[in-house]
Image (cartoon, rainbow, N blue to C red):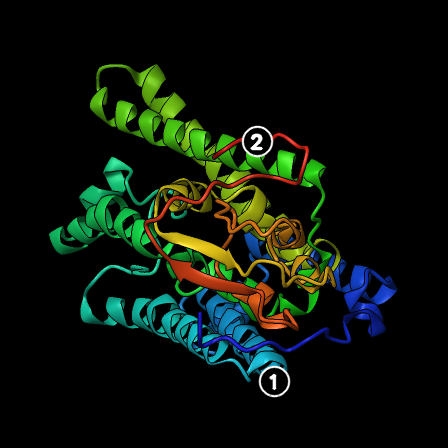
């Protein structure tokens, strides 16, 4: 990607709050506590009403935008010499402010349902549930279905999952900006990679099963009360365990100690689905042969825990399903060894030398 520019090694390890020091653990505890209070109490309802917002979720959306924009300013101060970074973060922030907060806030005033255009199934796990589609106007139901089965797959085949995970997604937006100071804490070990591959695809399977149960419950309505009740239980359990605990409490609360992409790397079903399509598509990271000096910047600052250096050392261009195309590996490379590109030419994705890598 010619729009990228190298920055060199950053002063990451000089700041205790970015190196799992006591201040990082305290901050993480505060974030976890915040999400627990948000999800499972009504303590934020009164502050929301006091500032004229309909409920606590609008208050959270406002706070989310504030912290995301603050994080974006921090990020661009560090890496804004890259046009790619400026474009990516600019689009990410604009999408969230406009489609993730402003439009859902305005739509009910116009007699339309609150709707988030930047989310698709399976990340927004209930968008394809029959009762959800039935409650939406026809144009929103069509948008939801086409976005899930046409837009997301085609875009991922053409440009990789980065179009969504690093440019559009709200989870990715917070990780890109507010979570950037802790990107180096993502574990790059082979053990972590193996856990990632099992966990993220297991959640995708759960999302598919939850949808199947919801559809089955709707089809058997008034015919099998037991199954209908079971379908509601499954939807509630999935929303609690995946939508609240993993995506919110764990996924964001542990930024300061485990890195900003815990949810995206290990549990997000959308990332899993788009990653499979990315492997079959045009996106890859191109390695210039015989130029790597093994400094390790690329691996250190990969927010998805990919051992990029091992590929560069082996002169091996690659496509990894977990890569979100943030471009940081190319940005911090002092020799310009790495480049993000799109091409239909086949490039095999292998693990470290001597290790067997499952190709998905």
* Element marked by disc 1: helix
Q: Position of residue 297 (x, y in %)?
A: 70, 64
Quarter of the view holding residue 277 = top left
- Residue situated furthest left in the rendering: 138
Residue, disc 2 = 198
Quarter of the view holding residue 184 = bottom right
Quarter of the view holding residue 159 = bottom left
The N terminus, quarter of image: bottom left
Tag of residue 77 = 1
Residue 63 vs 228, above or below: the answer is: below
Does residue 136 appear anywhere in the picture? no
User: What residue is rendered at 73% in x and 57% in y?
Assistant: 185
Q: Position of residue 62 (x, y in %)?
A: 48, 73
Q: Position of residue 316 (x, y in %)?
A: 55, 49
Earlier sequence position, callout 2 versus callout 1: 1
Between 71 and 11, the one lying in front of the other is 11
Residue 348 vs 340, above or below: the answer is: above
Q: Give the distance between the C-alpha atoms of the residues marked 2 and 1, in whole angstroms.
A: 36 Å
Between 145 and 101, the one lying in front of the other is 145
Task: Classify residue 84 as left or right of residue 287.
Answer: left
- Residue situated furthest right in the rendering: 22
Task: Classify residue 307 as left or right of residue 146.
Answer: right
């Amino acid at each position: 990607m010619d729009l990228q520019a190298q920055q060199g090694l950053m002063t990451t390890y000089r700041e205790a709050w970015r190196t799992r020091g006591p201040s990082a653990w305290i901050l993480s505890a505060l974030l976890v506590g915040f999400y627990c209070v948000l999800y499972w109490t009504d303590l934020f309802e009164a502050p929301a009403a006091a500032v004229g917002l309909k409920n606590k979720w609008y208050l959270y959306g406002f706070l989310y935008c504030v912290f995301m924009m603050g994080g974006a300013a921090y990020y661009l101060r560090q890496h804004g010499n890259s046009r790619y970074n400026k474009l990516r973060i600019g689009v990410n922030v604009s999408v969230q402010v406009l489609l993730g907060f402003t439009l859902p806030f305005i739509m009910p005033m116009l007699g339309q349902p609150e709707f988030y255009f930047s989310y698709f199934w399976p990340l927004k796990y209930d968008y394809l549930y029959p009762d959800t589609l039935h409650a939406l106007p026809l144009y929103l139901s069509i948008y939801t279905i086409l976005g899930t089965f046409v837009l997301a797959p085609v875009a991922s085949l053409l440009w990789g999952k980065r179009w969504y995970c690093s440019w559009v997604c709200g989870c990715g937006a917070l990780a890109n900006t507010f979570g950037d100071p802790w990107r180096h804490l993502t574990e790059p070990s082979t053990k972590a990679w193996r856990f990632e591959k099992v966990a993220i695809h297991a959640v995708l399977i759960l999302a598919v099963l939850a949808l199947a149960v919801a559809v089955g419950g709707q089809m058997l309505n008034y015919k099998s009360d037991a199954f209908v009740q079971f379908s509601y239980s499954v939807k509630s359990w999935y929303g609690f365990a995946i939508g609240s605990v993993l995506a919110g409490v764990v996924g964001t609360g542990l930024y300061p100690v485990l890195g900003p992409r815990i949810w995206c790397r290990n549990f997000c079903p959308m990332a899993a689905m788009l990653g499979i399509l990315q492997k079959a598509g045009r996106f890859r990271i191109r390695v210039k042969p015989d130029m790597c000096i093994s400094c390790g910047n690329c691996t250190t600052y990969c927010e998805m825990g990919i051992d990029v250096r091992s590929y560069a050392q082996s002169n091996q261009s690659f496509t990894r399903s977990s890569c979100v195309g943030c471009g940081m590996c190319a940005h911090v490379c002092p020799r310009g060894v790495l480049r993000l590109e799109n091409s239909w030419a086949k490039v095999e994705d292998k693990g470290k030398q001597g290790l067997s890598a499952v190709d998905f």
